[in-house]
Image (cartoon, rainbow, N blue to C red):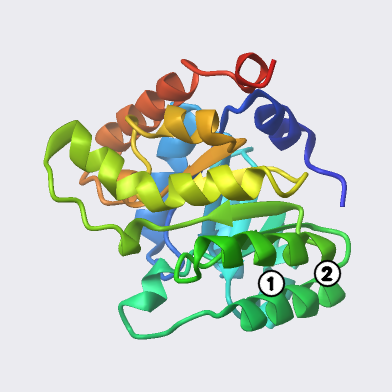
């Protein structure tokens, strides 16, 4: 599938910033707050729950590309009809606390089913962090063969930071940074590093090989829109300190 031009440019530069409202967040007011913050803060695109009403709401508030996330392929169809620009199987973190696991075979099957339903839309797939790192790489390669246009990493829930401040932020992001580094060397599609990413670790993700970052709780848990806008701007600024062209020159 041909990548959306604005996303393609951001991925090429290592400046892609996806703001995630939350896979299980169907609160229209909260979603609207995050959408406006992403728009005004300078994010590249948005990731919202797979709900046609939320897609229509987001489209009224921003011209940024809208990604919808789900783990049931059939939920994507009405969202694409409502105007979603890309789709994602992922953001599994919300399920792990409930004891729901996503193994490699299931994610690969979901990818194939989704690509069969929607062959002409940009498709992002998250590689579960519960897999060993070599298994994550193997799965990523199979996902690309099955039609994935973007691979997303995760890992925030598998980390256990023991220090506060900067060191703790790095510890929290270590699993997803490791996955981004390993997977980006194995696939030719953009890798988006997500889960536990902050202004401290966003540049590290690009240096590790990612083409962009996805940020959720660091923005969507803030208690007001101005704080969320400031948070997005800080992430944009952090990404501007590193460039893929200089890293890979």
Image height of 106 relative to 226, above or below: below
Does label 1 or label 2 sit earlier along the sequence? 1
Q: Is residue 174 left or right of residue 247?
A: left
157 and 47: which is toward the camera: 157
Indicate the position of residue 197 as horizontal and vertical percent values.
38, 43
Place of residue 97 in the rendered image (x, y in percent of width and height, measured from the top left)? 30, 77
The residue wearing badge 2 is 118
For the residue carrying disc 1, how many other residues have a C-alpha within 10 Å: few (<14), some (14-19), or many (20+)?
A: many
Element on which disc 1 rests: helix
Marker disc for residue 146: none
Which residue is rendered at x = 83% and y = 69% of the image?
A: 118
Q: How many marks?
A: 2
Q: Is residue 87 left or right of residue 196?
A: right
Q: Which residue corresponds to the image point at 52% horizontal and 60% vertical from the top-left?
A: 133
Q: Is residue 166 left or right of residue 244?
A: left
Residue occupying the far front of the picture: 134
Q: Which residue is mark 1?
A: 76
Residue at 28% over, 32% down: 226
- Whole-angstrom CA distance, mark 1 to mark 2, is 8 Å
Helix, strand or loop status at disc 2: loop
Q: Quadrant of the C terminus?
A: top right
- Quarter of the figure with residue 130: bottom left
In x, y percent, where is residue 120? Answer: 88, 60
Q: What residue lies at 82% left-to-right and 68% top-to-bottom?
A: 146
On the question of residue 194 being in view, the answer is: no
Are there few (<14), some (14-19), or many (20+) residues within 10 Å of tag 2? some
Residue 176 % position (x, y): 44, 51
Q: Are marks 1 and 2 in contact (CB under 8 Å)?
A: yes
């Amino acid at each position: 599938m041909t990548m959306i031009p604005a996303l393609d440019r951001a991925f090429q530069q290592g400046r892609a910033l996806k703001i995630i409202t939350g896979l299980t967040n169907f609160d229209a007011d909260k979603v609207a707050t995050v959408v406006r913050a992403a728009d005004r803060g300078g994010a590249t695109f948005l990731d919202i729950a797979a709900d046609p009403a939320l897609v229509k709401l987001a489209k009224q508030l921003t011209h940024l590309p809208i990604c919808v996330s789900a783990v049931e392929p059939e939920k994507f169809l009405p969202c694409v009809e409502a105007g979603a620009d890309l789709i994602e199987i992922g953001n599994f973190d919300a399920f792990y606390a409930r004891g729901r696991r996503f193994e490699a075979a299931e994610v690969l099957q979901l990818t194939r089913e989704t690509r069969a339903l929607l062959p002409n839309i940009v498709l992002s797939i998250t590689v579960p962090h519960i897999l060993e790192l070599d298994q994550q790489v193997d799965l990523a390669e199979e996902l690309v063969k099955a039609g994935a246009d973007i691979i997303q990493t995760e890992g925030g829930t598998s980390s256990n930071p023991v220090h506060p401040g900067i060191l703790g932020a790095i510890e929290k992001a270590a699993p997803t940074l490791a996955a981004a580094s390993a997977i980006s060397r194995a696939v030719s599609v953009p890798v988006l590093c997500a889960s536990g990413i902050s202004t401290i670790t966003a540049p590290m993700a690009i240096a590790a090989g990612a083409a962009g970052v996805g940020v959720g709780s660091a923005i969507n848990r803030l208690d007001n829109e101005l704080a969320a806008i400031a948070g997005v701007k800080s992430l944009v600024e952090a990404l501007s300190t590193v460039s893929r062209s200089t890293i890979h020159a």
